[in-house]
Every structure is written in structure tokens, then in C-alpha cells.
Image (spheres, grey):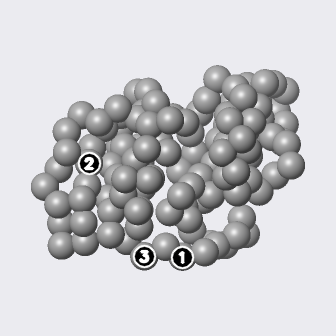
Amino acid sequence: MVKVTDLKFSLIYADDFDLTKAFYEKHFGFKESFEMAPTELGPQTWGMTGDVGMWIGGGHTPTKRDDRSARSGVMFGVDSAFTLLEELRADKVQIFQEDPIEMQPGVFWFQFEDPSGNIIEVLGGK
């Protein structure tokens, strides 16, 4: 058995590349490091959200899921889960919980659907 040493970066599969990239720029501070050569599916880019590397690739087919679907996930750590939830709600983003749920004292969690149908999770403070 191999030992997992760390998590390298997040991958965001997008149908609408420009909309998805703009969403992560606005809500997570995604900063493009460089645009990668497009694949047969579409454009792709590499950048950072805080200290976490992120790849966004276009041309993928969205699948509608709900918060109980089996899937791989991405969880972002944020300073305030409540502030982000309100920003997303103002942009009419599908959020699966009414309010962030306290997972342990002072640590809150919720899930939302990004523009390409990916279910993303957030863990952060009040």
C-alpha cells in the first residue's frame, strides 16, 4: 500500500469555461498563473485560490446531482462560511443547506453547486 503524502490541487471540470472561471475569480479569488493549451474538449487554465492550486478545464458535460450523489469532492477552507454563503445566495447559487452547519465549535460547513454543476463544499469560521 502506498502512503498519501498530500493533496496536490483541485480540479474543476466545466461546461462553460468562461462562466466557471469568472465564478471562481469572484468568490474564491482565483488568480490565473497561465493559460494552458486547449485540449480537444476546450480551453484550460492553471492558477491559485489562496495557497491551493486549481485547474479549470472546459468542454465537459454537466451532470445534475444533488447533495447525496456519490462523487469526488472539493472542500475549500474559508475565513467565514457565513459571508461566503450570503455572497453565493446573492448571486442565486444553488445552496444545499439553509445555513452553515456547525461541525465543531466555531467551524461551519455547507455545500453549493457551481456554474458547471460541481458540488463544492466549504469549511470555515463564523
Determine whether label 3 and label 1 are within 8 Å by CB.
yes
Residue 13 picture location, percent across and down: 40, 62
Q: Could you tell which of marks 2 and 1 lies nearer the N-terminus?
A: 2
Query: Crowdedness of circle 2 by 10 Å Cα count: few (<14), some, many (20+)?
Result: some
Instruction: Identify residue for label 2.
Output: 45
Drawn side of residue 117 relative to residue 53, left or right: right
Describe residue 47's horizontal placement relative to residue 115 as left or right: left
Tell me what residue is drawn at x 58 percent, y 45 percent.
Answer: 75
Residue 52 as seen in the image, left or right of residue 68: left
Helix or strand or loop: what does disc 2 sit on?
strand
Viewer-nearest residue: 112 or 52: 112
Left-right relation of 5 to 69: left
Kindly state the secondary structure of the residue where label 3 is placed: loop
Label 2, label 1: how far apart the Cα atoms are: 21 Å
Residue under the image location 32 percent in, 59 percent down: 57
Q: Mark 3 to mark 1: distance in Å?
A: 7 Å
Where is mark 3, residue-wise? 61
